[in-house]
Image (cartoon, rainbow, N blue to C red):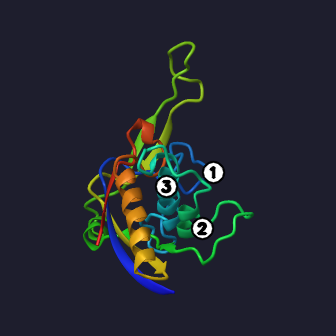
Amino acid sequence: MKKKKKNLKLTVETGLHIGMGNDAVQIGGVDSEVIKDPITKLPYIPGSSLKGKIRCLLETEGGTNGNGYGENDKSLNNIFGPKNQNIKTDAPTRLIFRDLSLSESSKNLYTEGEISNESKTEISIDRKTGTASKAGPRTIERVPPSISFEGSILIRYLNDKDLSETERIINEGIALLNNDYLGGSGSRGYGAVKIELT
């Protein structure tokens, strides 16, 4: 199989939260932190988060009629890999999504102390009483707007027609994501992003 690399840049437009899961929350601490590189302690975006979101949007909203390809679509299973172990494909998964790291300019903002992740405190409303829930407030960590990440997608393909079809589906998925959200709490305004492929 041949390979082609597509570089991408992702710019955060509204606070982005891709959580890492917390085993213990300290009093007064953040309830849900963003995922960070264990060495640099800087935020990154797992390739799996991007791949999963794009696939989900294609399954539910893609295609010419906007009703989605569905999870058993042969072209999606060939490109992203089958979800169901009973589905057989003719070749290895075509797409490899690399993790996205901070762009150099955004990394400098963090390391020079000019910017840091934001903490957003939220409360749950009891739907019956219309008052704050007894669960109390929770604090969510978010990557702030204007921060950018860079990464790549590696395409494995058999011939020019195969490459063209794969690129068409990737572009369709990215267009859908640019009109949706990445990460958690999108219905509350989180995770609007702009992705550009080169």
Tell me how far mark 1 sits from mark 3, CA to CA: 28 Å
- Point out residue 152 in the picture as x, y percentages from the top left corner: 40, 74
Give the camera-side residue of 47 and 161.
161
- Point out residue 97 in the picture as x, y percentages from the top left corner: 48, 71
Which of the two marks, 3 or 2, is nearer to us in this view? Answer: 2
Q: What type is the residue that disc 1 sits on?
A: Ala
Which of the two marks, 1 or 2, is nearer to us in this view? Answer: 2
Q: Secondary structure at mark 3?
A: helix
Q: What type is the residue that disc 3 sits on?
A: Lys
Q: Which residue is mark 2?
A: 81
Give the camera-side residue of 194 and 171.
171
Residue at the image position 34 percent from the left and 57 percent from the top: 116
Q: Is residue 177 left or right of residue 75?
A: left
Extreme residue toward the bottom, this view: 2
Q: Is residue 182 left or right of residue 71?
A: left
**Residue 74 occupies quadrant:** bottom right
> Could you tell me if residue 100 is visible in this image?
no
- Point out residue 105 in the picture as x, y percentages from the top left corner: 25, 70
> Could you tell me if residue 135 is visible in this image?
yes
Q: Which residue is mark 1?
A: 24
Q: Which residue is mark 3?
A: 53
Label pair 1/2, CB-CB below 8 angstroms: no
Q: Earlier in the sequence, mark 1 or mark 3?
A: 1
Q: Residues within 10 Å of mark 3 (few under 14, many from 20)?
A: some
